[in-house]
Image (cartoon, rainbow, N blue to C red):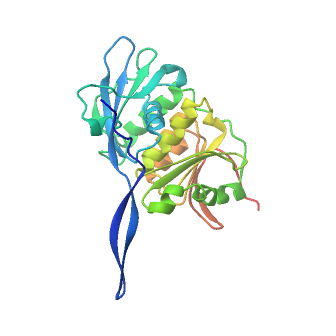
């Protein structure tokens, strides 16, 4: 049986646009949103469901790998044997590209209970329990100390504009978030877009994981606010500086302080607010 066509990142629709008393009918593009079920297969065992997230199709393998790293299921690329779309014969044709299996070279580094991903704004726990759990994951991955030098102010201020230049899906739909990993010269290592800001970060981190790129001396820039889960993913990946055009939450700043990270919010024009400084920020022009 022939496999179905992989869903695209956008879909065309016909719309009726009102502008005052003027009405035009034209074609528009919407960001595709579909569920992705992720499964984990430990060596010698059948695959088990890890979770489901609503995502924009594209870079699905990076998304799955990045999420496994963020949750501590894997510590690095050497823990991953293969990432592939599931060929389960019980799947309906429209599900074929919406189920990904991550096969491990051994056992999972950390156990899990199958759950619906994205059900909460963070990771299912709260307060000090969350901070302790992430600190443990970061330490287990050898990510407690961030070996970054000073980050110039002008570089931090430039990152949202650099990110925006890569947001092609946003240009066509206006309906996605973006996350970019940049080196300390401001060059984009990877930029990913998704309907979910967490997914965009997982895709970017997953790209680094699958390509064996060490993100330890990089800066993460996101297009929205900084919730706890964004800083969590950066901490486990070993990214020392996180920049956003929006505001961080209290728990995000607490986690950054405890893991020696720099968190910078409201980066717009010549303004930025430094909430936590694990890396010295050069404030001179």
Q: Please tell me which residue is depicted at 63% across the width and 36% down the height of the picture.
A: 216
Depth order, front residue of 96/220: 96
Quadrant position of residue 199: top left
The residue positioned farthest toward the right in the image shown = 285
**Percent from the top left, x then y, of residue 78?**
53, 20
Quadrant position of residue 112: top left
**Percent from the top left, x then y, of residue 119?**
29, 45
Examine the rendering and report whether any part of residue 260 can be seen.
yes
- The N terminus is located in which quarter? top left
Indicate whether 162 appears above or below 55: below
- The C terminus is located in which quarter? bottom right
Q: Please tell me which residue is depicted at 51% across the width and 53% down the height of the picture.
A: 178
Q: Please tell me which residue is depicted at 41% across the width and 16% down the height of the picture.
A: 107
Depth order, front residue of 239/84: 84
**Percent from the top left, x then y, of residue 39?**
34, 28
285 to the left or right of 250 = right
Q: Please tell me which residue is depicted at 32% across the width and 21% down the height of the picture.
A: 47
The residue positioned farthest toward the bottom in the image shown = 21
Depth order, front residue of 214/175: 175
**Percent from the top left, x then y, of residue 122?**
37, 45
The residue positioned farthest toward the top in the image shown = 44
């Amino acid at each position: 049986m022939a496999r179905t066509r992989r869903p695209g990142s956008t879909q065309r629709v016909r719309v009726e646009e009102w502008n005052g008393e003027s009405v035009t009918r034209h074609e528009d593009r919407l960001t595709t949103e579909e569920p992705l079920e992720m499964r984990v297969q430990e060596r010698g065992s059948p695959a088990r469901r890890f979770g489901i997230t609503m995502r924009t199709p594209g870079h699905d393998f990076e998304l799955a790998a990045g999420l496994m790293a963020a949750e501590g299921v894997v510590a690095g690329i050497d823990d991953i044997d293969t990432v592939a779309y599931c060929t389960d014969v019980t799947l309906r044709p429209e599900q074929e590209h919406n189920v990904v299996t991550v096969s491990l070279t051994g056992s999972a580094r950390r156990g899990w209970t199958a759950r619906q991903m994205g059900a909460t704004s963070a990771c299912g726990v709260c307060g000090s329990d969350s901070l302790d759990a992430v600190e443990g994951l970061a330490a287990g991955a050898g990510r407690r100390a961030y070996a970054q030098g000073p980050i110039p102010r002008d570089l931090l201020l430039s990152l949202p504009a650099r990110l925006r230049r890569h947001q092609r899906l946003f240009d066509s739909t206006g309906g996605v978030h973006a996350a970019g990993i940049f080196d300390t010269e401001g060059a984009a290592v990877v930029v990913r877009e998704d309907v979910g800001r967490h997914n965009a970060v997982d895709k970017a981190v997953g790209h680094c994981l699958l390509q064996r790129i060490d993100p330890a001396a990089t800066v993460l820039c996101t297009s929205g606010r900084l919730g706890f889960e964004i800083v969590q993913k950066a901490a486990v990946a070993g990214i020392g500086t996180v920049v956003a055009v929006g505001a961080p939450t209290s728990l995000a700043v607490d986690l950054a302080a405890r893991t020696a990270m720099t968190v910078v919010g409201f980066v717009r024009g010549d303004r930025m607010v430094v909430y936590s400084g694990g890396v010295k920020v050069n404030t001179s022009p």
